[in-house]
Image (cartoon, helix red, strand yellow):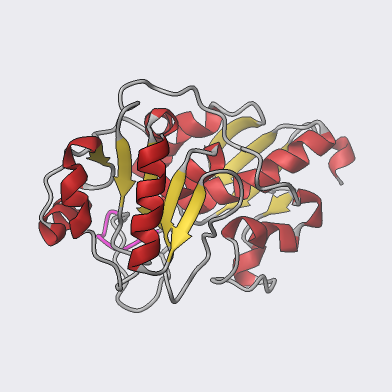
Amino acid sequence: MLKDEKFITVKHLANSGDIIAVMAGLKAVSEKLGKKIIFYQWLNVHAQYYQGATHPILDNDGKMVCMNEKTFEMMKPLMLSQDYIEDFREWKGEKVVVDLDIIRNKLFVNMPFGMIQSWIMFAYPDMACDLSKNWIDIKPSKKYKNKIIINFTERYRNTMISYFFLKEYEKDIVFTGTENEHKTFCSMWGIDVPRITLTNFYQLGQYIKGCRFFMGNQSMGWNLANAMGVPRILEVCQFAPNCQPFVGEHNYGFYHQDALEFYFKELNDKL
């Protein structure tokens, strides 16, 4: 079917972190076929998470959605910066060659378990690739080159962990996330670190790419750090461990406090 198509057109409905995850397979198939991707994102699809989950992306009625117009516009510069992406468009019913959403409504891929990048590869074997190699390429910013960037959302958290130990490293840390996520994290753990303000997610990528190392939970931030091969530490969620560490250099993860503090010290001393 692709023989007569100038571009590989794809449709996707899920969150920004899921976009970063499927980009690994899309880059691989783009290179194999010598065709760029036109990525259609379906907006304002109601989000279905686990019971009690909180997500800051809302539609005009205040209901949680996977992606709204604002998030779409923040994603656009990041998407268009990649050589294998021809365009990033809102999906309005266009016919596409590849439906990325079949992993949510048709095919079993062991969701929400396993490695999030691999889900689409179970559906489309020609998207299989080496996940130790970067699939997002962004020029780093020097703004936070001496800083540790952290990001902790309200979903998919590991409730066994304490971050009080970060008090010792306050001067070395900056937080990326929403105002509420920042306020909650600082208040809960008795630390006072500045929050990064963003124009778009390409800018976030520049900051993460240029920082000393990144630490966060299963989120768009960690997925972006992972896609760029930035030294990183992952807080793994016990009940839905779909982001996986230990692939590539300086890619660590933890379930328990001793491992967290071991890996933090390891990167802090080396980088």
Q: What kind of secondary structure does the magenta stretch mostly adopt?
A: loop
Residue 51 visible in the snapshot = yes
First to last magenta residue range: 60-65
Q: Who's the residue at 54% across and 39% down the image?
A: 229
Q: Is residue 63 magenta?
A: yes
- Towards the viewer: 186 or 120: 186
Number of dots carrying numbers: 0
Percent position of residue 23, x then y: 61, 44
User: Which of the 4 quarters of the picture holds residue 31?
Assistant: top right
Image quadrant assignment for residue 27: top right
Who's the residue at 57% across and 50% down the image?
21
Against 229, residue 144 (above or below) is above
Query: In the rendering, at what x and y percent does residue 205 appear?
Result: 43, 33
Is residue 121 a member of the stretch shown in magenta? Answer: no
Residue at 18% x, 59% y is: 164
Q: For this view, does 191 lie left or right of residue 147? A: left
**In front of the other: 166 or 109:** 166
Tell me residue 184's x, y (percent). 16, 57
Q: Is residue 266 left or right of residue 94?
A: left
**Position of 30 compared to 204: left or right?**
right
